[in-house]
Amino acid sequence: MATIKLPEQLPSPAQDSETLRKALDGLMHDGKAVIKVLGHRNATQRKIIRETYQELYNQDLIESLRSKISHNFGKAVVWWTYDPPERDARLVKNVLSSKEIGTNELQVIVEISCASSPHRLLAVRKCYCSLYQCSLEEDIIAYAPPFVIKILVALVSSFRYDGEVVDLNLANEEASKLQEAVALKRFDQDHVVWILSTRNVFQLKATFEAYYQKFGNHLYEDIKDFGNDLLESLVKDVIACIASPEKHFVEVIKVATDGWGTDEDSLSRVIVSRAEVDLMKVREAYMDIYKTSLDQLIKDETSGDYGAFLMALLGN
């Protein structure tokens, strides 16, 4: 359930390119004009605009945006302008190029692996190979912390069945296997990794429900004291992204905006990456959980062109 709103009368890609060219010309950029175009175009339209801009002006629109717009607005609008699989591939590369790969960094890879369709994940993997001349799996093995490599490689290389097929007997059987892993504090076992990385989303939801019915707790509540905070957080994020992606992203937003200051990178990532997927569901879940609107939170936590751009992606 996407939130962005498209104009009733859509300008041609050439007209949009000209508007952007004027908005980015000179010493100062026209943020409102950039938002009026890019904040109200879907992925297919943005891709055509980028191609048209290159043809007309012999410049990459991404580079023009990056050179003229800085700070949070610049980063958000650049991420948005990328074709979604390219955006995800670049986000993963940024994570794997980090000096320290912690919980927030691993969360990005889990989201792309577990909150995307199998076809989208495959497109990300292909794009990664094209951009960086190696596979995503190779870079995970080379740069990720050793104790999370097995599960990360399994998640990114999976192609789950995309249909609503559920075997309740299997769900009960695998719920028991997961409980055994909880008791042993070993979620890196091969059969556990195999369950989490290969079963279709509907099957896994049935398994999580069977776990709750049999053992009285939700699976993510029982995952604690593994002796490795990164592995514990990663597994919890896997379960959350599969069980209820919208609730997972609500919590990412909440953490990003709690306390002093705002984690704009995490906030932008959620709004940008989910605006054409399920941001309407995220908005509804935020209201259900916190009894206040996500729109109001964005207004309170952001300002200027950056805030206006995120609000445009929210459909305002």
Image (cartoon, helix red, strand yellow):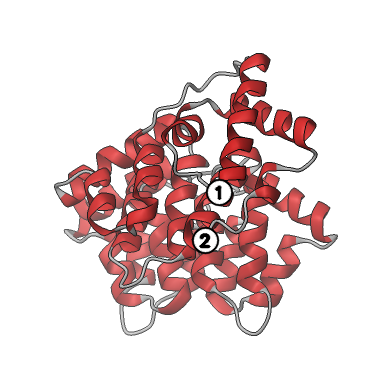
Above or below 175: residue 216: below
* Residue 17 in sight: no
Q: Quadrant of the C terminus?
A: bottom right
Q: Residue at x 64, y 37 (%)?
A: 179
| Callout 1 crowding tier (Cα within 10 Å): few <14, some 14–19, many ≥20 | some
Helix, strand or loop status at disc 1 = loop
Residue 54 place in picture, x, y as percent: 22, 54
Amino acid identity at mark 1: Lys
Helix, strand or loop status at disc 2 = loop
Pick the front one: 94 or 187: 187
| Callout 2 crowding tier (Cα within 10 Å): few <14, some 14–19, many ≥20 | few
Residue identified by numbered label 1: 185
Amino acid identity at mark 2: Gly
Residue 125 place in picture, x, y as percent: 30, 40
User: In the image, which disc is placed on residue 103?
Assistant: none
Residue 116 place in picture, x, y as percent: 48, 39
| CB contact under 8 Å: marks 1 and 2 | yes
Q: Quadrant of the N terminus?
A: top right
Q: Residue at x 59, y 26 (%)?
A: 174
Q: CA distance from mark 1 to mark 2?
A: 8 Å
Residue identified by numbered label 2: 227
Residue 200 place in picture, x, y as percent: 53, 25
Q: Is residue 80 left or right of residue 221?
A: left
